[in-house]
Amino acid sequence: MLFNTLEFALFYPLVFVLYWFVTRRSLRLQNIMLLVASYYFYGRWDWRFMFLLIFSTFLDYFSGLQIHRAGTRAAKRAWLIASVGINLGFLGCFKYYNFFASSFADMVGAFGFESDPIFLTVILPVGISFYTFHGLSYVFDIYYDRIKPTTDPVDYALFVGFFPLLVAGPIERATHLLPQIQRPRQFDVARAVDGCRQVLWGVFKKVVIADNAAEVVNSIFEGSATASGSTLLFGAVLFAFQIYGDFSGYSDIALGTARLLGIELLQNFSFPYFSRDIAEFWRRWHISLSSWFRDYVYIPLGGSRGGTWMKVRNTSIIFLVSGFWHGANWTFVAWGALHALFFLPLLLSGTNRSNMSIVAQNRMLPNLRELMGMVTTFLCVVLAWVFFRAEDLHHATGYLGGIFSSSLFSAPVGIPLQLLMLIGFFLLIEWGGRHGTYGLQVIGLSWPRPLRWVLYYGVLFLVFRFTGRSEEFIYFQF
Amino acid sequence: MGTFFRRLTLFALVPFAVAIITLLAADGRTDPYYLRFTTPRQSSLILGSSRPAQGIRPQVLDSVLRAHGKEVRSFNYGFALGYSNYGGSYLNSILRKLDPKATDGVFVLAVDPWGVADTHSPGSKAPGKAGGSFIATMKCVNMDPNIEYLLTVYDQPLLSILFPDRNSPGGRMLLHEDGWLEVEVPMLPAEVEKRTQAKLKEYRTQRLPGAAISPVRTSYLALTIDTLQKHGTVLLVRLPVDPRMLALEDSFAPHFNKLMKAVASSKGVEYLDFSEEGSSWAYTDGNHLTPESGAGVTAVIAEHLAKVMDGTQQ
């Protein structure tokens, strides 16, 4: 089930009513109802993969208990390895097996040997990368004694399967979400209104910005062989807005719908395109994944302790693994590698934490230095997105080669003025709202209610007037 | 909680009112299909692809039949290739649209090789929230306003119903209450030839490769005839097309007329073939009749139908 469908528009109010009116008096009943709703939400995509979700949930629940009960460090480690191995085994099997099989065939083919690899013909279960990481964070946290395992399988299953975050995150931590599941939730008007506002802004980002940009981006990327450099650059810039609108829009809807149920999820985006350097970008883009890799891979590898070589090695590993997490294609690895290249100079010069505050704090406009930083960072990110969007490495390098050609200075073809105006409005709201956690959150809060509602009606009007052709959320494929 | 609901209700009043106005404003300019799903169940249907959708005019059919003393109120339920090829989905949709009590209806089934062939159909990737499958997925085909269609199939922003773009290709189409799709395009010879060449290229490159008459679709055509015969008189019609389009069809289905004659004969219905009269009529793009030619062809069909209904045509 997709957030931007009629089905979800009917499903969610029903869940809301059952949650706050029918099951409110019993926390356990409330959680069971949410779990059933979550499995229904997931099963509407393909009910057969629910068994995989349930198995993964049971595995981590059971592993968590065993790690906690194990008497020795070695026994704990054995249970951890078993859990991680099986989890990553499933992920590898469904997501990466065909990639490794074809890469192996290509490699041996390069040495003159023929191979006939067996490929799996199964589709990738939606959300597997997300719920696998939920489960892994849980067993890691128990192993490192950060939390005690829950003894209630319903609570744990809900932590993994909570429908707003099940298929595309944010990637939650047991330390953050599980306690909220285990205690009674109170309805709060201000938070509920904030949730509605965030859903509205998320829907706008998805159906107006991302879906409209997608039509132009698809056409430019498909015809990239014959497009001018300026058109290709324009296509890459639009893709930056498409993927941001798509993924952060999804996250906003997830956070908003959860907040309406009295549950706070982790913030996943914080105005990444206003970053002044790549390090700041990575503190603001897909925060739940970046921090996951930081806590469960980077720090266990030694983090920034040790010499320069260790820092370079660990940082490179994180970016490469992060790229690979997105999909079984060398383009994602190249995307991660490119970001590592952008990031390492900052790390080595010790300037990776020089932009920690909000850009142009207490000012309306950025200064020249901030502006230059934002433009440079955005362009680096845009160039890296070409790898993310391209079909394969050949397509990506051809696309980049096309950008850096003499036709870069010609006028781009097929500029959709209407879309540019919508992006302009979007950036205006995001800039004005950068002190909040999402664009629309703080804008107009001090205005009289009628005026504030005019703003919300305006956004609603744009949603229904400029809905793009419906596209699936990009991050569903990861 | 009460405060929240009061505020939400108050806030939702304006969008709700606009939504109601929008749904009620949907009409024949909304898109090429919408109105076909807003009328009540019908007792007489014109079926097939976009050729009959644009080329067979219910009003003309009814008036000619009326002149022969037959009171018929026909409805054009043809869509487009990729949507309304003869098959299970289309038959189910027809059954949803058909008045089950009808016994003296008239059913004109337009046939051509594409409609009973397996082809790579660009229509299957056509726009629409339900992709090319809305004929199969639409449960309510007789509801006004048709909320199911507008929310799940209509692929434009909802408010474009209130603010239509008259310059878009869709802006030059008008779907009449009787299901006839009127297309208003410039008819200068050079413009027509340009559209014809484009249409021929589309068919040659996208539909023709691998195209072959499908026994399954042919048997569904026979099943559709069987089903409709219980409700009235059935007539099979092959509409005229530009001779160059006919040559394309003959290239993969040279025996199509023979096949249709066999189907018609086995079911005891008439087959009216206009394929040899391609040069006698005018087209907007080599594939679809102009409104005037459509009226002429419809009048011929109606005369033929009248004879069939009188039992004088054998």
Image (cartoon, rainbow, N blue to C red):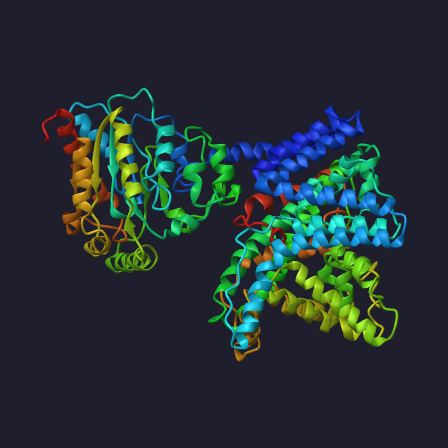
Q: Is residue B205 left or right of residue B148?
A: left
Which residue is at the front of the view, B145 or A256?
A: A256
Q: Residue at x 26, y 35 (%)?
A: B222
Q: Percent x, y for residue B43?
A: 30, 25
Residue A204 appears anywhere in the view: yes
Task: Say if B250 sits above or below A256 in the image.
Answer: below
Q: Residue at x 43, y 45 (%)?
A: B132
Q: Quadrant of the N terminus of chain A?
A: top right
Task: Say if B69 sits above or below B211 in the image.
Answer: above
Q: Percent x, y for residue A77?
A: 83, 54
Task: Say if B183 sits above or below A375 in the image.
Answer: above
Task: Say if B68 sits above or below A66 in the image.
Answer: above
Q: Percent x, y for residue A338?
A: 68, 71
Q: Residue at x 36, y 53 (%)?
A: B120
Q: Quadrant of residue A456?
A: top right
How many labels were placed on the picture?
0
Q: Quadrant of the C terminus of chain A?
A: bottom right
Which residue is at the front of the view, A322 or A375?
A: A322
Q: Is residue A468 left or right of residue A93?
A: left
Q: Percent x, y for residue B299?
A: 18, 36
Q: Quadrant of residue B71?
A: top left
Q: Is residue A3 left or right of residue A178?
A: left
Q: Farthest residue toward the bottom?
A: A406
Residue A234 appears anywhere in the view: no
